[in-house]
Amino acid sequence: MNLTGLNEEQYQAVTHGEGPLLVLAGAGSGKTRVITYRIAHLITSGVSSDRILALSFTNKAAREVKERVVSNVGKERSDGLTVSTFHALGLQILRQEGKRIGIPTSFTLMGEGERRSIIVGVIRDLSLPIDPLLVGEAIGRWKNRGLTPAEVDLGDSPEAKPLLDAFKLYEQMTRAQQRVDFDDLLLLPLNIFRRYPDSGSWWREKYQHILVDEYQDTNRVQFELLRELTGERGNICVVGDDDQSIYGWRGAEVELILRFPEHFAGAKRVVLDKNYRSTSTILNAAHAIVASLPDRHDKKLRAEEGRGSLIGWIEAENEEEEAEKIIAHILADRFRRRRSWNSYAILYRTNGQSRPLEQALRSQNLPHNVVGGTRFFDRKEVRDLVSYLRAIDNPSDDASLMRIANVPKRGLGHKTMLDLLELSRDRRLPLQAVLAGSADGISHSASRAGAKALLELLERYRARFSEEGVTPDNLTDFIKDARLREEVRSSYDSSRAVERRLELFDQIVEGVMALNKGRKRLPLGEFLDAVTLDPPEDKDDGEEDGITLMTLHSAKGLEFPVVFISGVEEGLLPHLREEGALEREEEERRLFYVGMTRAKEELVLSHAKMRRRKGRLRSSEPSRFLSEIPPELTVREGVEERVDEAEEAEMAKNFFEEMQRMLGSKDDQ
């Protein structure tokens, strides 16, 4: 294949032969291109595509890699290629190998909502005065370190015993209901490989070349899983950037990319340091933030885009004035540059900072999209439908049955179902079996009829889905027969709210249609796995051409011509707690670096002297990070003004056009 478009470092990474390879790919250096070209190069060099495994952290990234490889070598030659997330691979391994450790092939994969429901039940059963969030975090932290309840050592922290007790009961309940969570998709395959060497050997033989994107985001279990899959052959290529390691709070360990040459002996190192995104001013300022990190790979990005504008620096009296000044800069730049609204992004450290920004944008009728609202699977209507389908697919799934027993209302209230759940535990039977055996004995006639109708619905569609698989037609029929659309119409007063929530059902049906393409039958369990691992995009009220508002974490992997980072203040950025303050500050530096390197042409940083926190107006100090940016790279109160007479005339013309647009849109409301 033609590699002439690659720079020297990219070419080295793409054409590397056998053995481990570390590709340090700075922001905007073309890492996805390197991954896709390397896969294509392996295939065109004689490696069978079904012997290649490429892993990413998001479904979107996996799809992009697969599409680019197909574009490079054709569908036929890339047909056997596996490009997936770690969790999708873990699911595949567990479906095939889980029976070795007592996990049935038909297990249910829980989404985050179902996991929370189990944890709430655990807390209730143990009568623990603990926030479910703390329990969930503790369980996730232990699992990400590869620990089972029996392996957790509380050491000098006996106060954590209630959390460990919750972990033990959580594991018992999920196994009894034949359910696994996302952390299990990594930990259980690793345990299988360690207990059954022949299993690991089979998977190592299957995948002879492994590539990993965003390696700086790996946790301990993912790392150990990679070592098991790589084996002595050592054909592993990882691509990442330690300066962009920002997920320590969810288990990622930056040390894994820093110590890669020690973990995989003889590793070759290639540094991609040519940046094709940002100006040299932005890159030099960003480098000043991470250069002081005590432990990092030595590298500095070189800009291909020239010097560009100085970095803007806005100081405001309070968060409302900060929002107003940011919007004023956007309007001035838009009139001058004629950029589209989606050229602008406003980034912040925490979701709570978006309120004054949203209010200011709404007050001026400016189009905007807030990223990071309610996730698709957190919406009640989606969780109800998926819980119904899980109760059909897995009759042992008590949590799903508890959720939908009285949706819509059928006389099976919470107390009735809790009594039946207690009875099911006494008899050591699934709740669905106990409900079936007790339905005739329910004294209240409406509840008795409701129980029978629910069981009949589940059995009828269990038979239908088993025979036909899931299709757009039978899923649409089920939504109708379960009266889920009626439930939505009776739950909301606003016609727009009803319309938006009914559209959620349509999105799931569209997902079935997409998954059914090119296949004779889609099993219900396989459909549930797919929508849990890769939920549909949430089509909310966002505007196609609008200013983007999002957290710094959400901005990872994106780029915008103009970026504003608001709230660059002590207590917000860095966002520190007392415990682990040094490690947290290092990650906060990297997070600020990530935000800065999202900007292609212009970057503006802002802070307020006063900010409302926990309901009280408090004084704020500029972030320590601001003092580390060389002053010659910044300009106070915004961006550089370089306006000649012609531009001034054009700005005036644009201004009146924009005012007409805004006034016109207000008249339409």
Image (cartoon, rainbow, N blue to C red):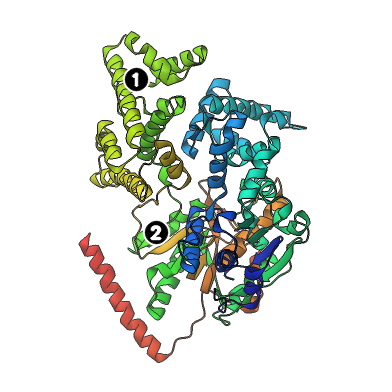
Front residue of 74 and 93? 74
Q: Residue 412 carries which label?
A: 1
Q: Is residue 200 left or right of residue 508?
A: right
Check disc 1 and give the amino acid type: Leu
Front residue of 452 and 504? 452
> Can the viewer see residue 491?
no
Front residue of 567 and 548? 548
Q: In which quarter of the image is residue 54?
A: bottom right
Pointer 2 residue: 369
- Crowd class of label 2 (few under 14; some 14 to 19; many from 20; radius 10 Å): some
Q: In which quarter of the image is residue 338?
A: bottom left
Q: How many labels does the image show?
A: 2
Task: Tell me: residue 171, above or below residue 420.
Answer: below
Query: Which residue does the image show at 51% across and 55% down from the upper left?
Result: 80
Q: Which mark is residue 218?
A: none
> Residue 242: x and y, percent?
67, 60
